[in-house]
Image (tube, coloured by chain):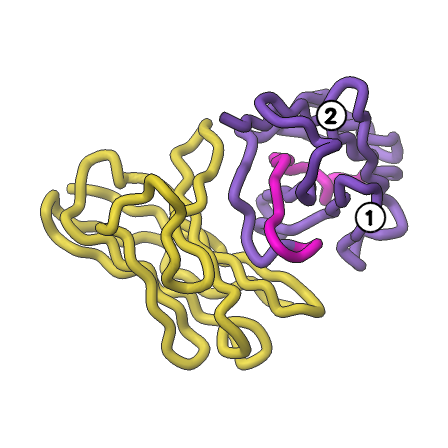
Chain colours: A purple, B yellow
Amino acid sequence: QVQLQESGPALVRPSQTLFLTCTVSGYSISSGFYWGWVRQSPGQGLEWIATIYHKGSTYYNPSLKTRVTIFLDKTNNQISLTLESVTAADTAIYYCVRPRIASAGHYFDLWGQGTSVTVSS
Amino acid sequence: QSALTQPRSVSGSPGQSVTISCTGTSSDVGANNYVSWYQHHPGKAPQLILYYVTERPSGVPDRFSGSKSGNTASLTISGLQADDEADYFCYSYAGTYTVFGGGTKLTVL
């Protein structure tokens, strides 16, 4: 079955860029679907971050749009996310997800286990 | 947009039923049927258990059911089992924005 596995640094310094990767197994991301990221932070709760369509169209949460980039690595079957100029407010568990039907997701039918990121000096 | 409002915790004994509410506004929960529910056992991947208010994905038992009235959606779990003990959160797609619930911890007594 299709599985999502996030990876990335556990600790990031303030003002640095966070780089996260989601490895998809059991399905080629080139073949279809939207793919995205959601995060859960102590302060903001759960929040949709970004989505990318398998053909490359990208969609961003307006509140994060200026700092976020999502892209596909089709060679390695991965979805990657960069978040620039991080602050403590970006401390969260970051989940890789598969949004269904719409770019921001009518719903999310697949989730990874999440990767915990702390922003601290 | 504010998070959807869920009770922080609910509890029930094995075999009983519990209902978890998810209250939004006329712009999100009340505006359409794009409400979904997720079960999350800590440390594991969240799992979709309901979408479009009442639809169950393949493999989700019919003990899980959903409904909506006005700006409030509800998840009902009947015949509680020990494995149902988990966090549950709702989600609403409002078109111009999306919003999650704050999450509810279900304890099976």
The residue lying toward the viewer, choosing from A13 and A80, is A80
Q: Which amino acid is tagged 1?
A: Thr
**Image check: B40 left or right of A120?**
left
The x and y percentages for residue B62 are 24, 51
Residue A28 on the magenta span: no
The residue lying toward the viewer, choosing from A119 and B47, is B47
Query: Which numbered disc covers residue A78?
Result: 2
Q: Is residue A121 visible?
A: no
**Residue under the point 58% across and 58% down:** A106
Secondary-structure class at tag 2: strand
**Residue under the point 72% across and 44% down:** A89
The x and y percentages for residue A46 are 58, 49
User: Toward which corner of the image does residue A56 lie, by quadrant?
Assistant: top right
A105, above or below A11, in the image: below
The residue lying toward the viewer, choosing from B46 and A30, is A30
A8, above or below A68, in the image: above
Secondary-structure class at tag 1: strand
**Image mark 1: chain:** A
The x and y percentages for residue A53 are 76, 45
Look at the image and give the residue range highlighted in magenta: A86-104
- Category of crowding for the residue at label 1, using alpha-carbon neighbours closer than 10 angstroms: few (below 14), some (14–19), many (at least 20): some
User: Toward which corner of the image does residue B85 lie, by quadrant?
Assistant: top left
Q: Which amino acid is tagged 2?
A: Gln
